[in-house]
Amino acid sequence: MSEASKAQGEAARGQIKGAREPLLELRNLATWFRTDEGIAKAVDGVSYQIYPGETLGLVGESGSGKSVSALSIMRLVPSPPGFVERGEIFFKGEPLLSIPDEDFRLIRGNEIAMIFQEPMTALNPVYTVGDQVMEAIILHRGLDRVAAREHAIKMLTKVGIPSPETRVDTYPHEMSGGMRQRVMIAIAMSCDPALLIADEPTTALDVTIQAQILDLILELQEQAGMSVLLITHDLAVVAETAQHVAVMYAGKVVEYASVEDLFAQPRHPYSIGLFRSLPDLATQGKRLAAIPGMVPSATQFPSGCRFRPRCSIATDLCASSEPPLVSLEAGGAHTVACHHLEEARAL
Amino acid sequence: MSDPVNPGNAKAPLLEVRGLKKYFPVRKGLFSRVVGQVKAVDGLDFTLGRGETMSLVGESGCGKTTAGRTLLRLLAPTAGQVLYTPDPEAAPIDIFKLSAAEMRALRPDLQIIFQDPYASLNPRITVGNAIAEPLLVHKVTTASEVEDRVAQLLERVGLRPDVGNRFPHEFSGGQRQRVGIARALALGPKLIICDEAVSALDVSIQAQVINLLKDLQEEFGISYIFIAHDLSVVRYLSDSLAVMYLGRIVESGTAQQIFDDPQHPYTRALLSAIPHADPSKRGERIPMTGEIPSPIHPPSGCHFHTRCALAEDRCRSEWPASVVLGAGHQAACHLVQSAGTGEA
Ligand SMILES: Nc1ncnc2c1ncn2[C@@H]1O[C@H](COP(=O)(O)OP(=O)(O)OP(=O)(O)O)[C@@H](O)[C@H]1O
Ligand SMILES: Nc1ncnc2c1ncn2[C@@H]1O[C@H](COP(=O)(O)OP(=O)(O)OP(=O)(O)O)[C@@H](O)[C@H]1O
Ligand code: SF4
Ligand code: SF4
Ligand SMILES: [Mg+2]
Ligand SMILES: [Mg+2]
């Protein structure tokens, strides 16, 4: 991470205090699925904001609804069984959910682009990588094939693919996992999106390749000033890349804060437990403070606070009423959903 | 089996691996002609102490899984020797020299658990029966006692004993991993190879399983060979570690030596790539361009020279011999300086 991008982050945070408009905002979004076991409330009243030029890290246990919230933004939730139950998504101030599908196609892949964990499933095995990079450019930029090919080679160069002039004609299976992820990024970046959604973009990769890909995303972000929604289960990746973090648990955001505030002092009992579970130098040789139990199924969330069965300070109130997400201090950016914040401080 | 580890015996290693090699043939064409070899594991030397954990780390494809499977003879070795000394008072057992029957008798001692135990559990067999099976096959428990023993094992790994009559798909990832551990534990192993055993688990569940592995080690004196790509987990669990690159160990030592004082350029680059869970430490990384080359055509000389910022002429022609840097600390690089008379 360079000094320049640190300074940029600093500047960006300064601007937030001056009440900057978010680029994207989820407001009370609920995306559910009809399943054999009943309704799966995968995303159930989620709000978060992504500011221009910033990265929001979205973390949380497997099945907590991270991907479904992103797919909801992209309108890629399989339907049936999935449907948006309530809530709204604002992009540049416009409500996204009420835009007709034909018009949304001009936004998807153009203003908002997405990359996935497993690039092999997202890339089409029967087309060359060049064809796939060109597709979006031809669709959204109206370039002819010759110009699109030029642009595709430029994009492959930009994401660090060696000998792009020959690589442009190869097929995805001829590339390593790290290269395929670079191709995905080239496709996503080809139309200069305002928002890049990266769903576990490095989870399947080695740390060395992960570092290269994260550096690449940060570098492209700096050049283009785009925003990034980075979904990951790795808190360290968030620490290295994000300005804000939303922690999800069982279909809800339980804590939202600047990366500095969250890492300095997580306030929700689940976030606290998550940090304690990390093996690091401080815990060397000691037992890890694992959170007992496991995540409830999305079809059977417990009443009240969904973390209650695993929370050591739960009370009757936690069983009867669901804690709302509230600011720690009036107007502050750090919000937490817990009835017993004072007690949680002593955890 | 429940004897605490005797620290007095710590000197006699449980396992000593010498020159371990595993090559796979590369076949091509209509008649599957052998056209070359993948040198997946190309001469490993290391020792594993009693009740200790040694980790194998390195990028995807460097040969970690192959090394683990070969040293347990789940794959036929190409070359090398594995000396196993379950009883420190007795002579070591040369694993690759055992007959099939002798090897079978040793199986209970040597277990392996994988990233997704789901793949190794039969979906139509209850987890109770899956755990009972090795007990009955190796006749370590009589049919009348087996139910109690299974219940005991399930409880030991933190599952309710009555879940024994459920099927694998009814379990979460963390629970399935516990079933896999119970199964490996059933026969009272001395060594468990954990191949990415916690990699697929959520942080909070991963911590539960790591704690369980540590408890079992303390209770039963089990040694682990831990294969993982998450280096913070490796640091937390390991007594020693070996860093692999294209089938060879480039640096080995105690966890402290490797993490606090890495000497090989590859180890340094690998460690600097680990993100820190601390936003104030957004650090500079040692740049390492490119990806791990194909083991079918490994680079000449030092395998790492195609990505090493410090490479010089001789790196391209001469394979660097391992240099002793301190007690138990070795690295194979032309640029590292020997500590003179290291007593490794
Ligand atoms: N097509 C579907 N049909 C039914 N349920 C679904 C479907 N897709 C997702 N879900 C459910 O929605 C919930 C949230 O899933 P989601 O993929 O968003 O989790 P996640 O936070 O991204 O987890 P992970 O870290 O494992 O990727 C899960 O309980 C999942 O089972
Ligand atoms: N049965 C096989 N036949 C041919 N080549 C193989 C076979 N098994 C593994 N290899 C090759 O041997 C090398 C080492 O593979 P191995 O699975 O041991 O790596 P690894 O370090 O465990 O990687 P990962 O981190 O991806 O699990 C790779 O190049 C692989 O393609
Ligand atoms: S609301 Fe209650 S159960 Fe939920 S996290 Fe807070 S204290 Fe725990
Ligand atoms: S021997 Fe040469 S190429 Fe290999 S790690 Fe050392 S300096 Fe780098
Ligand atoms: Mg997901
Ligand atoms: Mg492997």
Image (tube, coloured by chain):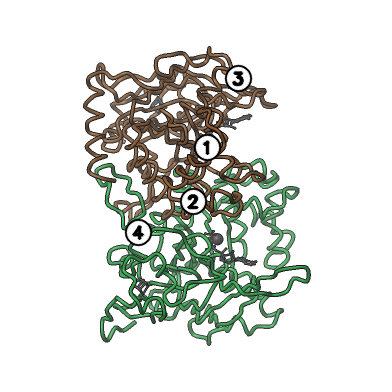
**Which residue has dot 4 on it?**
B271
Q: Which mark is residue A164?
A: 2
Q: Residue B185 or A237: which is nearer the viewer?
A: A237
**What whole-number distance in Å separates the C-alpha atoms at marks 3 and 2?**
41 Å
3 vs 1, front mark: 1
Q: Residue A279 or B33: which is nearer the viewer?
A: B33
Q: Residue A157 or B259: which is nearer the viewer?
A: A157
Which is nearer the N-term, disc 3 or disc 1? 3
Q: Which residue type carries mark 3? A: Phe
Q: Residue A9 or B226: which is nearer the viewer?
A: A9
Q: Chain of mark 3?
A: A
Which chain can be seen in green?
B
**What whole-number distance in Å separates the C-alpha atoms at marks 4 and 2?**
30 Å
Crowding around mark 1 (Cα neighbors within 10 Å: few <14, some 14 to 19, many 20+) is many
Which is nearer the N-term, disc 2 or disc 1? 1
Q: Are marks 4 and 2 in contact (CB under 8 Å)?
A: no
**What whole-number distance in Å separates the C-alpha atoms at marks 2 and 1?**
14 Å
**Which residue has dot 1 on it?**
A148
